[in-house]
């Protein structure tokens, strides 16, 4: 799937949703610094809508117009920002849109606990795995993030970053919802193709 085509499609859908006054691209795609691992960062401007309530409804609103594989919220960013990540392509696990709501009513009626309650633990771990795999492949210092991710499933023994990514991927292969089996298969394929020194 061509990322630029997907960006244009998402922006067109978002701009037509009730309460949306604008939609803007930011991040690596806007700055022309994107690579094969880059996600889509979109900021949504709202008029009078509650940004927390809007973000809770957003995956269903999008799913009425385009295929969404999963949705995962970022509770730690609230109440300053309300962000939901949506997976878009089964063949490219890195094609994710991070949708951020700004403006609207402050403070929002939506709590961080409400956002956490919406997240499926396996899907949340999948999102973290994809992000950590991306950072590892870019040779960024992501050791602390990988350790935090691995600890969520009880992995505490010191291992290489790549071995922890491997162990978490094995867990995901057993625990991710069956509807995401092709996505998980492609996570495995990409991980195998891009593995570096352990």
Image (cartoon, grey):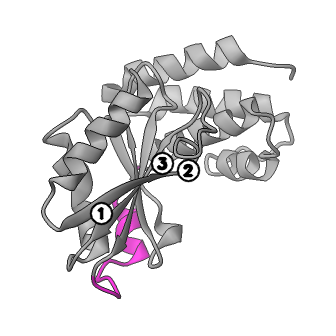
Do residues under tags 3 and 1 come within 8 Å of each other at their CB atoms? no
Instruction: Report the residue marked by disc 2.
Output: 27
Q: Residue 50 at what x, y percent from top left? A: 25, 77
Looking at the rendered structure, the secondary structure element under dot 1 is helix
Nearer to the camera, 196 or 50: 50
The residue nearer to you, when weighing 27 against 84, is: 27
Element marked by disc 3: helix
**Magenta extent:** 105-120
Tell me, yes or no, whether the highlighted magenta stretch contains residue 2: no
**How far from the left and from the top, in percent, is residue 139?**
81, 34
- x then y, percent, for residue 149: 65, 48
Q: Which of marks 3 and 1 is nearer the N terminus?
A: 1
Residue 34 circle label: none
Asked whether 142 or 96 is in front, the reply is 96
Label 2: element kind: loop
| Real-space Cα separation, disc 3 to disc 2, in angstroms | 22 Å
| Residue on which disc 1 sits | 55
Q: Earlier in the sequence, mark 3 or mark 2?
A: 2
Q: Are marks 2 and 1 in contact (CB under 8 Å)?
A: no
Image vertical order of residue 77 relative to residue 179, above or below? below
* Residue position for label 3: 124
Q: Residue at x 66, y 13 (%)?
A: 192
- Residue farthest along the bottom direction in this orientation: 107
Determine crowd level at label 1: few under 14, some 14-19, many 20+ residues with C-alpha closer than 10 A.
many
Residue 153 visible: yes
């Amino acid at each position: 799937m061509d990322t630029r085509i997907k960006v244009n499609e998402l922006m067109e859908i978002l701009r037509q949703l009730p309460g949306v006054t604008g939609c803007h691209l930011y991040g690596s795609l806007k700055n022309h610094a994107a690579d094969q691992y880059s996600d889509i960062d979109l900021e949504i401007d709202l008029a009078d809508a509650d940004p927390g309530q809007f973000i809770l409804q957003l995956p269903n609103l999008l799913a009425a117009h385009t295929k969404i594989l999963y949705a995962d919220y970022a509770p730690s960013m609230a109440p300053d920002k309300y962000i939901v990540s949506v997976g878009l392509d089964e063949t490219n696990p890195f094609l994710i849109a991070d949708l951020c709501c700004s403006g609207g009513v402050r403070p929002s009626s939506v709590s961080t606990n409400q956002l956490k309650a919406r997240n499926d633990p396996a899907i949340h771990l999948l999102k973290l795995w994809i992000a950590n795999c991306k950072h590892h492949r870019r040779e960024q210092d992501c050791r602390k993030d990988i350790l935090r991710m691995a600890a969520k499933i009880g992995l505490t023994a010191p291992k290489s970053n790549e071995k922890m990514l491997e162990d978490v991927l094995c867990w995901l292969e057993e625990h991710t919802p069956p509807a995401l089996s092709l996505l998980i298969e492609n996570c495995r394929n990409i991980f195998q193709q891009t593995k570096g020194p352990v």
